[in-house]
Amino acid sequence: MAKQKTLLNKSSNQFLEKYLNNPSPTGFEKEGQKIWLKYMRPYIDDYWVDNYGSVVGIINPKAKYKVVIEAHADEISWFVHYITPEGFIYLRRNGGSDHQIAPSKRVNIHTDNGIVKAVFGWPAIHTRRGAKEQAPTLKNIFLDVGCSTKEEVEELGVHVGCVITYEDEFMILNKNNYVGRALDNRIGGFMIAEVARLLKENNVKLPFGLYITNSVQEEVGLRGAQMIAEKIQPDVAIVTDVCHDTSTPMIDKIVQGDLKSGLGPVLTYGPAVQNNLLDLVIAAATKSNIPFQRAAASRSTGTDTDAFAYSNAGVPSVLISTPLRYMHTTVEMAHKSDVENGIRLIYESLLQIKNGHDFRYFK
């Protein structure tokens, strides 16, 4: 990349750790969005926040031609659903939370009085007798806050509707891997913020308006992207998300495809992906020697790409994904090189887009 000595710096890494450690559950993304916007402010000309919390940093806000680079800010979580007379708490999902990983996890219950600590209890192995052992399900996992009555729980400020997140924090594994909860998809929010930084530091003057968009509520149906696409009304959308690293045990490549961390970001083929825009991204990767992998989607990508693509009478959209191990667990893992190459690929793709670029399927 022209005039670029290093991709990530000390400030970038500090932001990444702080951003990933901060809870940002679906529907309650505010504090994470504040961290993201504070980091972005030196690199943008303007910003706005919509009614549900999606944040958009803007470069060249007066330009008529609009290009979006987008990630989603929310993480899966739980809701307090039912408090028993004995003080145990049963839950409902907020997004695609995995009941099988819950037993013995430590969590934070977010209340008006602050954080209340709790644990997912589970019967000791000595007590689980019988021919068929009971597996964790949404009906039998529960939280224990150390209380003996419902009234004690409520005195702590816990009530139906309080949101719950795991307390696991960010770490770097074997120097090359980012690990933590909610890399899906705050790693994408980090990537698009780094693109904004690089554009500023490299003095790149884009011929169009760039809308760096961190959307809310992806985990419950792409809702934030649906709203924000209508507000921005973009001409082009480059969306980032995560996909499955299928090289780990117990994954069927015939079903899930053949993708591996460390081999580059993933470009998806599918109905929502606009072919001419995808060709531009592939050309940018080839020109800049950026490694990438390929995946195929069926009816939909299952990402915010779908929301942008089918908005406003059709917006040319493309999906750039980071291979992720152990999605929707507390130890989601992404390779550093895939993150850096994803940043490079978005950056170089932007340099190939012209003001008024016509991506029509054919003319």
Image (cartoon, rainbow, N blue to C red):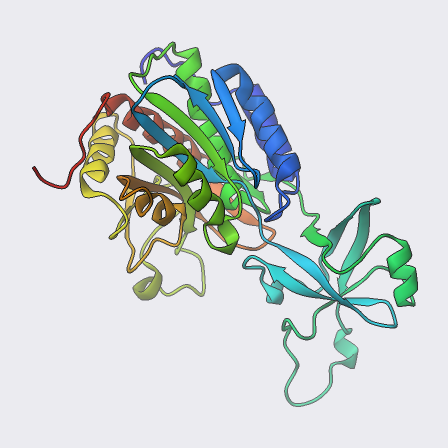
Q: Residue at x 61, y 26 (%)?
A: 14
Where residue 161 appears, x then y in whole percent? 72, 57
Please say whether residue 7 is visible from this viewpoint.
no
From the image, which quarter does the N terminus lie in?
top left
Q: Residue furthest bottom?
A: 131
Q: Which x, y percent locates residue 225?
A: 44, 43
Number of labels in the image equals 0
Using the rendered image of the protein, determine whether residue 255 is visible from the camera's viewpoint: yes
Q: Where residue 217 appears, x then y in whole percent?
A: 53, 48
Quadrant of residue 341 within the rendered picture: top left
Residue 349 lies, with reference to residue 89, above or below; the image says above
Q: Is residue 260 above or below residue 104?
A: above
Q: Which residue lies at the image location 28% right of the left edge and 28% below the top edge?
A: 349
Q: Nearer the viewer, residue 313 or 6?
A: 313
| Quadrant for the C terminus in the image | top left
As rendered, which of 260 and 60 lies closer to the eye?
A: 60
Q: Is residue 122 left or right of residue 222?
A: right
Relative side of 195 to 287, left or right: right
Could you tell me which residue is drawn at 29 percent across and 16 percent down?
207
The picture places residue 332, in percent across and down from the top left corner, at 54, 49
Relative placement, left or right, of 267 versus 199 is left
